[in-house]
Amino acid sequence: MAIFRGEIGFGKIAEFFPSITQILVLGTALHLASRKLPALIDTIRDVLHTLITLNAKYQALLKRANSPPGIPVANPSSPYWLDDPPFPDLVDRQDDIPDQADVVIIGSGIAGVSAAKAILELWPGNSSSSSSSSRSTDATSEEEGSNEDDYIDGGSPRPPLVVVLEARQICSGATGRNGGHIKSAPYEVYSDMRNKLGHERASAIVRFQMQHLPCLVELGKQFPLAEAREVETVDLFLEEKDLDEAEQHVKDAMAAVPKYTAEVWRGDEASKEFDTNKYIAGAISFKAGAIWPYRLVTSVWNHLLTTYPNLLISTRTPVHDIEASASTTHPYLVKSSRGTINARHVLHATNGFAPQFVPALRGRLTGALAHMSAQRPGPSFPAYHGDRSWSIIYAPGFDYITQRPDRADGTSGDLMVGGGFFRSKDEGMDQVGVWDDSRVDSLPMMHVRACMPGVFDPKWGIGGAALK
């Protein structure tokens, strides 16, 4: 009690100590807290466990992404696109492997066939008007390490020998497994690239990506098996806030790239226009395309093989190593399961497998496990005759759907449905740094097989079936 009677005085005590009532309230609170303390400790423990687990999963992801991919597995899943191949002799084609080649292309998908087509068709010797210039060009090459074997017929340039090595069957990687979309989302691309690179570069990237559609549709006229066509594509948004943000991006992209046009639909208007149910907040529609990727690529390979005898393809021929050679003309040794090729140039057309032989790409380019399915539409699904495609947009992911043209009997074409990436057990983290395409995860596949009726029912009906 001495302190109460000291120099501070009782009147000052209230400034330093709570009142009796406050003491009672504080005491009660401390008592209750002491009773809840075990629960609080449990909560903190759970949070720490979650953070530690997330960090472990992220570190595992980084380890996978920085690892060499290896070579494609020998027993991949069987995709719909590869059924009933139009050129059976191409599927397991194995030309004789030469000791030397001007260009070795690793991979036979869309990147590989594009490179081969460009090399063979744009070779100067194919143009009668460029004989003198090509001889001059080759003379320069000779000074840089060419030899007399580069010329035939007393000085005419020899066409380049192009060898394509494919680890499995022709075009059996990503090109033979994707959704068949010819589609970019200019409003998304422009917004993202503008933030990173500025207006000018973002606009140029959008214009470049938009050129893919007319180029592929025009190429498809030469190879009709590819079913290359223009479609109306519809991005269906599940959340209002995502649609609001996308609408502003549409306005920005249309102002930056006048050739790009899109239309924004909201609420009931969107549902009525696109036959969806009430779960759709709105939609954005614009022009895109669809294609049978495998049939385009194999059609082009067949054309090139019948046109250019200096093209060789060897499937089921995985490359195991690439080494430097002492040769000044053919500085690369490409070691495959069928022998070694001395190559002047090596082109890696292996998508996510490129880091296997280009270590600098590890951690920058990696594999990802995505899921696709082929489905029959439900009996109440409207007939679009293959002229429409869809994306279902939800943060942070999306699903993507194309539909083949009507069947010969007049019934609707099959639906090619993919997505569900973030629906995996670890919300997509376990799908990154994965190259094994024999693996199918149940959770993404459950999502993929249910997303269409989920958006279109009752205009879906009882039925529909998963084909693959």
Image: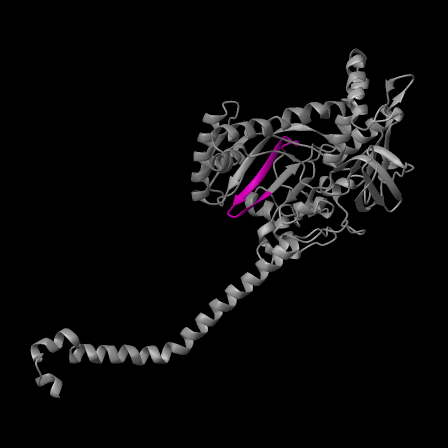
Looking at the picture, the colour scheme in use is: one colour
Q: Residue at x 49, y 27 (%)?
A: 200
Image quadrant for the N terminus? bottom left
Q: Residue at x 57, y 55 (%)?
A: 427
Asked whether residue 418 is in view, the answer is: yes
In the image, taking residue 183 as reference, residue 345 lies left or right, namely right
Of 100 and 284, the residue lying toward us: 100
Q: Main secondary structure of the magenta part?
A: strand
- Residue 316 appears at what percent x and percent y? 85, 44
Asked whether residue 408 is in view, the answer is: no
What span is colored magenta in the figure?
A: 384-399
In the image, taking residue 78 as reference, residue 233 lies left or right, namely left
Q: Quadrant of residue 54?
A: bottom right
Of 401 and 408, the residue lying toward us: 401
- Residue 386 appears at what percent x and percent y? 66, 32
Of 381 and 36, the residue lying toward us: 36
- Residue 294 appears at what percent x and percent y? 75, 36
- Residue 209 appears at what percent x and percent y? 59, 30
